[in-house]
Image: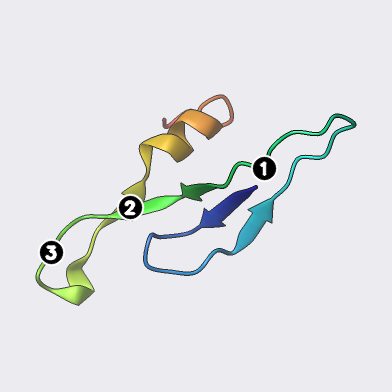
Amino acid sequence: MTYVKTTCTKPAKRILLQFGFQKVLPVEETLIIEDEAKSDDCEMKQRFYSDEYKKLTRSFYLGF
């Protein structure tokens, strides 16, 4: 089971499940799409895609 969150501070927007015919122990993971740069000013936070998200979607986007 993978919980997909837009940022680390927000709740999960999606839950990914994998189904099969063999019994396996469930594994819980979290995928965070965007990381936020540290800044004192809340309105000046810069967001960028997390390394895990880039690795997952690299073949679909030329900018990664």
Would you say 2 lies left or right of 62 here?
right
Q: Residue at x 38, y 60 (%)?
A: 8
Q: Residue at x 60, y 41 (%)?
A: 27
Q: Nearer the viewer, mark 1 or mark 2?
A: 1
x, y percent for residue 52: 43, 36
Label pair 1/2, CB-CB below 8 angstroms: no
| Distance (Cα) linking label 1 and label 2 | 26 Å
Camera sees residue 64: yes
| Distance (Cα) linking label 3 and label 1 | 37 Å
**Looking at this rendering, what residue extends furthest in the top direction?**
59
Q: Residue at x 13, y 64 (%)?
A: 39
x, y percent for residue 33: 46, 50
> Please, what is the three-letter code of the amino acid marked with disc 3?
Ser
> Please, what is the three-letter code of the amino acid marked with disc 2?
Asp
> Please, what is the three-letter code of the amino acid marked with disc 1?
Pro
Q: Residue at x 76, y 40 (%)?
A: 18
Can you tell which mark lies on residue 26?
1
Residue, disc 2: 35
Residue, disc 3: 39
| Distance (Cα) linking label 2 and label 3 | 12 Å
Q: Nearer the viewer, mark 3 or mark 1?
A: 1
Label 1, residues with CA under 10 Å away: few <14, some 14-19, many ≥20 = few
